[in-house]
Image (spheres, rainbow, N blue to C red):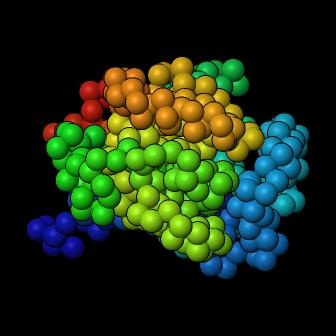
Amino acid sequence: MTPDQAPPPAPLLFVIGTTGGGHRSAALAVSEALDRAYPGQFAPVIHDALAGRGTPFRLRFVVSLYAPGIRLAPWLWGMSWRFSDKRWALALVRRTAFGAVRGRVAAAVSAHRPAAVVAFHGMVTWPAVLARQHAQPGAPVITVITDLVTTHRSWREPAVDMIVVPSPAVAGSCRADGMAPGQWTEMGLPVAADFAAGPLPEGDRRALRRALGLSEERFVVVVTGGAEGAGRIFRKATAIAGRLGDVSVVAICGHNDLLRQRLTRSAARYGDRLTVLGFVGNMADWMRCADVVVTKAGPGTIAEAACCGAALILTSHVPGQEEGNAEFVVAAGAGRWAPRLPELLAVISELQHDPDALARMRAASGRLARPGAAAAIARLVASLVSPGEEAAAGERGAAALSPSSASGR
């Protein structure tokens, strides 16, 4: 390499698992933030250790049960989550159902020789530590927790170099485990730059509604259930469109193609009051133009909605990792809890006719936002890979951080 040539980008390994879409979304957000703050200096590779190419059939089968499980038998998922949250049970699960994860992560570390490994899924944290010890000694292992309030024991692996926690509640869990304060740092849950841009002024919201084919005057309700389309979206979307006047309902079904097809067949009876979509790449636009977002209490959706200043109506949660999320949102004044359909319709009707209450909810939602989380995590990764690199980023990294995220709020 000649003196005027830049060094090659440092390889990074971002290890995820496709149980829901939040793990990949968080990894992509941090990858984008690294590219903005340190262009050409890092080369992240996102590796799905649970269901990616080359995964053994048994592990793929176990992981494939997640989506139908949380939709059709959430109580069963909750039982398995609580069982494996015990220390001895987690060790058993790591050796049996998820035994192949260790080899998958080890192979990825050996292939890419990363300067750092970043774990975005609880079940890859311990395998990442083992792989680092055998194939890449000295490379830091960082965990980015993508659950908001209640976390599985697998996330809080003390052998990693740093744990990024999204909230004070998760920091409290780390303390309860006996970890020293220097083992974790609170930075928020990373969201993509599209969400981090913040809410829109009213005039721009109206223009966005026009661009998306929605009425400027109607009350807009976005109904979503995360990447898996969970949470009985069909019943809720059709009830809102059919029973409430002067509303536009947007049902976003994610990867749940059966739900999308079923809703599409029913949409004609509601005219332009019901818009049916599958997985969308412009979720930030739909959240910004919404009056309310009706959803299960998924951490990624909550974090994204907060950055867009959207009021939330939470109707369900996945037992285990999403417990506590609804209370977190309601206590902040950013949303309501309406688990039954009559309650949901009543809350929407109330907010539809009380713009002041809706405005207070939207403002409270915005106060929960951590738009600088991805940039802060990018700076952390850079500083652990190359000490002094954080300072070298200068104002690029500082500009990407909001005052609240920079202060750890």
Q: Is residue 397 among what the camera can see?
A: no
- Tell which residue pokes out farthest to the left in this image: 4
Residue beneath the point at 38% across and 44% down = 219
Q: Quadrant of the C terminus?
A: top left
Residue beneath the point at 49% across and 35% down = 349
Number of numbered callouts drawn: 0
Q: Is residue 67 above or below residue 203?
A: below
Seen from the viewer's position, the closer of residues 236 and 118 is 236
Q: Position of residue 354 (x, y in %)?
A: 39, 26
Seen from the viewer's position, the closer of residues 390 and 239 is 239
Q: Is residue 395 among what the camera can see?
A: yes
Q: Position of residue 175 (x, y in %)?
A: 63, 21
Q: Position of residue 255 (x, y in %)?
A: 58, 68
Q: Is residue 56 above or below residue 84?
A: below
Residue beneath the point at 13% across and 67% down = 3
Q: Position of residue 150 (x, y in %)?
A: 66, 33
Seen from the viewer's position, the closer of residues 275 and 363 is 275
Q: Is residue 187 above or below residue 238?
A: above
Compared across the picture, whether 370 is left or right of 294 comes to left
Residue beneath the point at 60% across and 31% down = 337
Seen from the viewer's position, the closer of residues 248 and 9 is 248
Compared across the picture, whether 402 is left or right of 292 comes to left
